[in-house]
Image (spheres, rainbow, N blue to C red):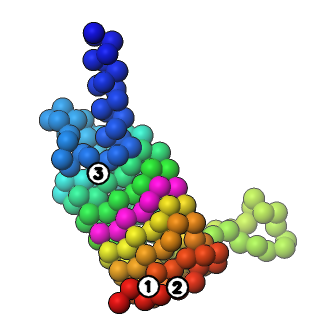
Amino acid sequence: MKIIEQKLNKWADNRLKYLSWSYFSEATIEQRLEQMAFQEALRQAANCQFNGDCYVSEDAYVYPDNFIIGNKTFICGGSIIRGSFEAGDDCCIGSYSHIAGNVKLGSHVMIAGGASIYGFNHGMETDRIIGHQPCSSKGIIIGDNCWIGASVTIVDGVTVGANSIVAAGAVVTKNIPDWSVAGGVPAKVIKNRK
């Protein structure tokens, strides 16, 4: 019976790490205390700022230059965040998303699993080998109330306008206006949500 109880406890902990929205309604006092300790460790080690009740899975890889997240924002297990990252309130970073470079999210942004959001780029000069090219960063901005679908890729210099939806698998290389539904490779506006 003890083995079953241990397995159930491990299952419950992993559930929280990968279905992180559950934290706000299901976390025990012990799990909340563990999260507070983890956030404090991130504050000290990596210049992280947590505003309000938010959650970062201990199975996420957070190695930022700058990191700020708002109230009710959560980052699921397997996600990688590096560079300068800022998210407003009530944002979701789905499992196995990779966010790098200079990326800023408004509030109420949902990023589904497996998204790749790269707010930097490598140079392509012909006088240097690829691995030695300098990096540049224009940054990425995703406005309030957006849904970025599973496995979407967004490249440096793009703004996704507020209230927009980007369909699963899209590759966003140009700005998306407010209230748009966009999809495809490269992504194009399919319709206006209004």
Identify which amino acid the numbered label 3 is placed on. Trp
Residue shown at the point (34%, 26%) measured from the top left: 10
The residue that label 3 is drawn on is 21
Circle on res. 180: 1
**Which callout, 2 or 3, points to the residue nearer the camera?**
2
The residue that label 2 is drawn on is 190
Question: Dot 3 lies on which element?
Answer: helix
Q: Mark 3 or mark 1: which comes first in sequence?
A: 3
**Which callout, 2 or 1, points to the residue nearer the camera?**
2
Q: Which of the two residues, 120 or 141, is positioned nearer the viewer here?
A: 141
Residue at far top of view: 1
Res 74 → quadrant: bottom left
Question: Dot 2 lies on which element?
Answer: strand
Residue 105 image point, x, y percent: 37, 70
Left-right relation of 1 to 77: left
Residue 97 image point, x, y percent: 49, 55
What residue range appears in magenta? 108-114
Quarter of the picture containing the C terminus is bottom left
Residue 96 image point, x, y percent: 50, 50
Give the distance between the C-alpha atoms of the residues marked 3 and 1, in whole angstroms: 26 Å
Marks 1 and 2: in contact by CB < 8 Å? yes
Identify which amino acid the numbered label 2 is placed on. Ile
Residue 114 image point, x, y percent: 52, 55
Residue shown at the point (40%, 70%) measured from the top left: 147
Identify which amino acid the numbered label 1 is placed on. Ser
One can see residue 22 in this view: yes
Q: Mark 2 or mark 3: which comes first in sequence?
A: 3
Give the distance between the C-alpha atoms of the residues marked 2 and 3, in whole angstroms: 30 Å
Residue shown at the point (57%, 84%) measured from the top left: 188
Q: Which of the two residues, 15 or 105, is positioned nearer the viewer here?
A: 15
Q: For the residue carrying disc 3, how many other residues have a C-alpha within 10 Å: few (<14), some (14-19), or many (20+)? A: many
One can see residue 97 in this view: no
